[in-house]
Amino acid sequence: MNDGPVMSPLPPRPTDLAQQIIRRIVSAGDTAIDATAGNGHDTLFLAELVGEEGRVLAFDVQEAAIGSSRARIFKAGFADRVEFFHQS
């Protein structure tokens, strides 16, 4: 007999766990902030979650990171949902 709690397996990467949690919080129409836009993967993830009516405010201190993030978002067709800020 097993009286302990049943635990689901952890995702293989910490980012997968973070995305599972964020999916429960961010909904269509929301405004989300990506404080470290980097290469744009998380910005894209957030843009998908907020949908057509939502906004993502993406920040990065590196101009090159903003450029690569902007290109990724444009290619995905979400440029109208994301506003980029080059600042800390």
Image (cartoon, rainbow, N blue to C red):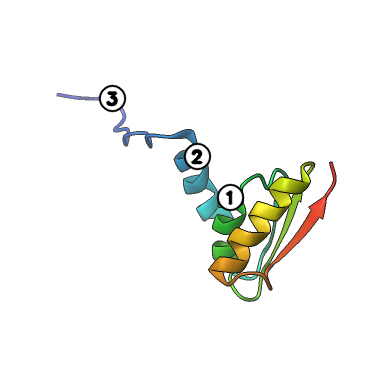
Disc number lying in front (1 or 3): 1
Which of the image's four quarters has the N terminus? top left
Which amino acid, by three-letter code, is at mark 1?
Answer: Asp
Residue at the disc numbered 2:
15
Q: Compared to 65, does 83 lie above or below?
A: below
Q: What residue type is labelled 3?
A: Gly
Q: Within the image, what quadrant is residue 69 found in? A: bottom right
Identified by mark 2, the residue type is Thr
Q: Which mark is residue 79?
A: none
Q: Specify the label residue 4 is tagged with.
A: 3
Above or below, 75 against 69 in this view is below
Q: Can residue 27 be seen in this view?
A: no
The residue at the point 32 percent across, 36 percent down is 8
Measured as percent of width and height from the top left, residue 75 is found at 56, 67
Q: Residue furthest right?
A: 87
Q: Mark 1 points at which residue?
A: 42
